[in-house]
Image: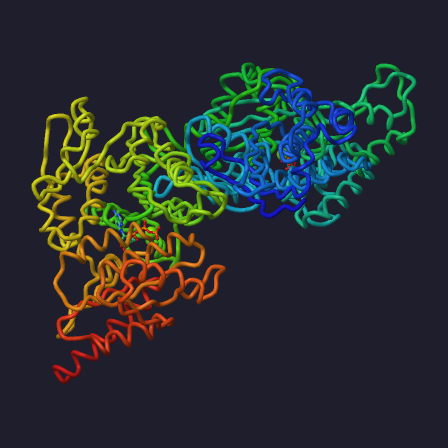
Amino acid sequence: MIIRDIHALRGPNYWSVNRHKLIVMVLDIGDMEQRPTNTIDGFHERIKEKLPTLYEHSCSEGCPGGFFMRVEAGTWIGHVIEHIALEIQTLAGMDTGFGRTRGYGEEGVYNVVFSYMEEEVGLYSAKAAVRLAMALVENKPYDLEADIQIMRQIREKVRLGPSTGSIIEEAEARNIPWMRLNQNSLCQLGYGVNQKRIQATVTSQTSNIGVEIACDKEDTKFLLEKSEVPVPRGEIIRTEEELKASVNYIGYPLVIKPVSGNHGRGITTNIQTWNEALHGFASAKLISNAIIIERYLEGEDYRLLVINYKLVAASIRTAAHIVGDGKTTIQGLIDLTNQDPKRGYGHEKVLTLIEVNDMTLNILEEKGLTPLSVLNDGEVLKLKDTANLSTGGTAEDVTDLVHPYNIFMAERIAKIIDLDICGIDIITTDIGQPLPETGGAVLEVNAGPGFRMHLSPTKGLPRNVAGHVLDMLYPLGSSSRIPIIAVAGTNGKTTTTRLIAHMARMKGYKVGYTTTDGVYIQNRLMMAGDCTGPASAEFVLKDPTVDFAVLESARGGLLRAGLAFKNCDIGIVTNVAADHLGLKGIETIEQLARVKSVIPDTVFPHGYAILNADDDLVYEMRESVKSNVALFSLDENNERIIKHGKSGGLYAIYENGYITICKGEWKMRVSKAINVPLTFEGKAIFMIQNLLPAVLAGYIENFSIEDMKLALESFVPSPALTPGRLNMFRFRHFDVLVDYAHNPAGLSALKQMIDKMDGYPKVGIIAGIGDRRVEDNIEIGAVAASMFDKVIIRQDKNLRGKTEDEIIEMVYSGIKSVDPNKPVSIITQENEAVAIAINTAEEGSLLVLCTDAVQESLQLIMKFKEDEAKRLYDF
Ligand code: ATP
Ligand code: ATP
Ligand code: MG
Ligand code: MG
């Protein structure tokens, strides 16, 4: 068995528009194709024994035990691996359950698809499932527990912490998009100009000065004291002499703690003697040079959480402790407490495991105890000096008990320190009484406070504190999104994308757009190359200057990783034609259409899918969309269009020479096609076809007809505006047209235009493509033969798995099948082919270069133009 390929999808994809987190494994099961599970002795029993919980998988039978029934009756190993991969993730604490196993188009090769919670774990589970399945087939032992432990560890390493996780979950519930910006907890909420960032519970709006003040306990205390907020009497010291003076001045009981510290490190509380003071001084010194010495306050530890200057939650925190039973040792009681399933390592679970550390040993020592001592029945022993959750403490929600005075005080403190999100630590005997009355005080203010104790308190009501963060970042009526227009189809995507971007730019938007040529932000090329996948789309959506996104979204990225966005406002499909067939398990044009249909399927219900009514496969896509549908057609008498119009639908047509938008009975002419330079006086019908969805998109985005007319009429097919898409260079004695046609449909479209153009002879420079099917390359030759008087066959730089001779032979045979006498030259280097064609161009001829290396060819031809100008005008 061979894993040929394995990759993780992260967005809407071919397998599912709604389930984004999927692993796709291309599995060649080899001779297992001849060995379904019912033919393998004992397999059914072994899998049942190894993974009894697979009983829950109902599979196609639709009832518990269904999957086992399939195994008994006989199913293939790829299918079994899918179920194992899902189940072992569930066993490792990541419950997930979507799977599909389908033929890849080759005998014995399968696409095994299953969902994951954490990508790295999903990838691991795929490989582990293959190993386990083979062990079951071969009746060999297998250590499944080891795999599951590794998967747990990976999860702990990669997943977001509890506070960040809660904000992200809340964002998802509110349909606010988000992206992770690093391996840790830095995340982006929203898109483009409307983005906000969070890092754990610090937001992009959190004041830096506020964080700095909060991180310095001395400054915090000072500011609070000056504002008449009660704080424990104390001072900062650095030396033992100062310690002595302070002890005398403040008096026991005391607390000693480092100025900059957290998680209770270096703190000694309830100091009653000089010896203890010295001890505490030494341990605080390990953390910071400046040390706080202050009055020890009697009472309970409270945490008040203030978000957006409103108190949203309060808890009472209790240090890790045990209660004796007269029998069990201290260590035994700790172990027993740690067995609570709510306790886990670090922030893994609601509570943290209690660790016997120096702080605990000190406490025991002072009491003359060891971990092996036995406490009296009912005796309570605090194991830590501090009540932090991270040292094993517990928390109880007391939000509803906080006295209004204390609420007022907490909200005022948030303003004094200047923190939009803060956790205020208070010690008092009763939070239900005003602080000045109980003699309690504020210990410190925390920036980026943890939410864990409020989200899942050990006792009391859980509070959705993350909701308050989102209310603050995105108040009612504000938007987290920017318009996204996604463009799919076999041909015309880049052109349509550029056109829409041009229109939006003229409206004053700061447009970010992705194309086959690169990613552009406000017309500046940011990345060159084929940028039609999710990484490029994400690049645009991450850009904080962009307020309008137009995203060419090609098949490759969709199959490799899924879309970068879950929803778009407008999804366009220009057409579906045979191209890229036989790649990545997509064999038929119907399958190809399904890949592209992911784009309209992701359109918001209030948005529009813009579909080509002249293309059967594209027209069919309207059936699965959840949004409105707008259609376009080159033929105003197209029955589908007429029907759509009768029911009041929105559509665009080419009628009487006009690009026209219609809605029901209502009709608005945008521009005469011959006035749009891109159409070459109306000769380039395929360009008219690209204008139609573009104007529909503009209309939906509320661009005025006048603005769109101006945009279309100023969109010149120049190398700057649409490089490689119908760029015409007029030399003195001949013309050169550069175009990116690279499949039979594209070339046929170009032929329609070339047939209407003057020039003799017409010379075409064309190429086949290595990873396309034989019939497609032959077809390219055949179409070229019918377009040109002479053909030059060049070669792409990247041969994509075939030899030069093989590709040329296919194209050549295509040409000869149409016209055995057609003059054909073979000049494999594109640059050389262009140079020779230009240098030998006949008077009045038209040279058509179907290029692959757009920028290079354009540079070369412009150089020839320059040379000609120099010769003619002598400058
Ligand atoms: P964290 O990581 O929770 O912010 P920290 O290291 O910043 O902890 P503090 O919050 O100042 O330290 O103190 C931690 C704990 O120590 C308090 O929650 C409280 O239980 C105890 N403590 C600190 N100062 C005093 C005091 N003056 N009187 C009584 N207990 C105190
Ligand atoms: P790719 O998949 O390579 O990115 P694309 O879909 O982005 O292609 P464009 O770059 O806009 O398409 O156009 C490529 C070529 O396809 C054009 O140069 C033209 O020859 C042809 N073409 C453009 N629009 C259409 C159309 N609507 N129908 C058929 N062919 C077209
Ligand atoms: Mg604290
Ligand atoms: Mg393109």
Above or below for 19 versus 275:
above
Residue nearest the viewer, comparing 40 with 343 = 40
Where is residue 284 shown, x and y percent of the image? 72, 44
Residue at 67% in and 27% down: 74
Ligand 3, seen in the image, is in the quarter at top right
Residue at 38% in and 66% down: 795
Residue nearest the viewer, comparing 661 with 213 = 661
> Dividing the image into 4 quarters, which one contains the N terminus?
top right
Left or right of 760? Residue 499 is: right
Where is residue 844 shown, x and y percent of the image? 13, 71
Above or below for 497 versus 60:
below
Left or right of 612? Residue 105 is: right
Where is residue 477 shown, x and y percent of the image? 32, 28
Left or right of 852? Residue 317 is: right
Q: Quadrant of residue 842?
A: bottom left
Asked if residue 253 shows in the view, the reply is no
> Dividing the image into 4 quarters, which one contains the C terminus?
bottom left
Residue nearest the viewer, comparing 396 with 703 = 703
Q: Quadrant of residue 219?
A: top right
Asked if residue 833 shows in the view, the reply is yes
Above or below for 63 versus 534:
above
Residue nearest the viewer, comparing 48 with 137 = 137
Where is residue 810 shown, x and y percent of the image? 39, 60
